[in-house]
Image: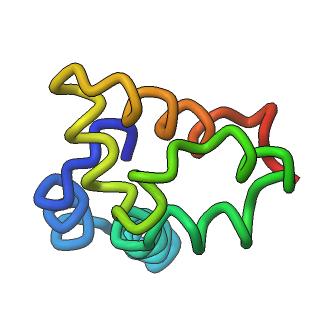
């Protein structure tokens, strides 16, 4: 999940031995495909929206992770705000 690799998560669904493992992988895929603005509303403290880079609001978590890994500083900030437990509700 932290790498934003949908292919790897889909492989996990295929080889998962329990329904719980499959459900966790599906939840991770759904989260990666969700737009940042929706994740902020659902999971994060309201103060996150003030600090969140505006150009990243309409991007999916998968896109943000890929941009952050390629060195985009706004995406790095967005990833940190979305992934860090200290910013969760």
Q: Nearer the viewer, residue 8 or 78?
A: 78
Q: Nearer the viewer, residue 35 or 13?
A: 35
Task: Give the side of residue 15 with respect to residue 25, left or right.
Answer: left
Q: Position of residue 28 (x, y in %)?
A: 43, 63
Q: Nearer the viewer, residue 27 or 55?
A: 55
Image mark count? 0
Q: Quadrant of the C terminus?
A: bottom right
Task: Give the side of residue 69 with respect to residue 50, left or right.
Answer: left
Q: Residue at x 29, y 66 (%)?
A: 16
Task: Give the side of residue 30 with respect to residue 47, left or right.
Answer: left
Q: Position of residue 32 (x, y in %)?
A: 37, 62
Q: Residue at x 18, y 67 (%)?
A: 10
Q: Position of residue 27 (x, y in %)?
A: 48, 72
Q: Residue at x 24, y 59 (%)?
A: 9
Name the image quarter holding residue 72: top left
Q: Position of residue 69 (x, y in %)?
A: 23, 26
Q: How is the image coloured?
A: rainbow
Q: Residue at x 45, y 79 (%)?
A: 19
Residue 17 position (above or below residue 70): below
Residue 28 position (above or below residue 53): below
């Amino acid at each position: 999940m932290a790498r934003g690799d949908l292919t790897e998560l889909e492989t996990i669904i295929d080889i998962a031995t329990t329904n719980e493992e499959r459900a966790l992988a599906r939840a991770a895929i759904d989260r990666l495909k969700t737009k940042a603005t929706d994740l902020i509303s659902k999971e994060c403290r309201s103060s996150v929206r003030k600090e969140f880079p505006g150009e990243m609001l309409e991007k999916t978590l998968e896109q943000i992770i890929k941009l952050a890994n390629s060195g985009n500083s706004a995406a790095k900030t967005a990833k940190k705000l979305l992934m860090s437990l200290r910013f969760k509700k």
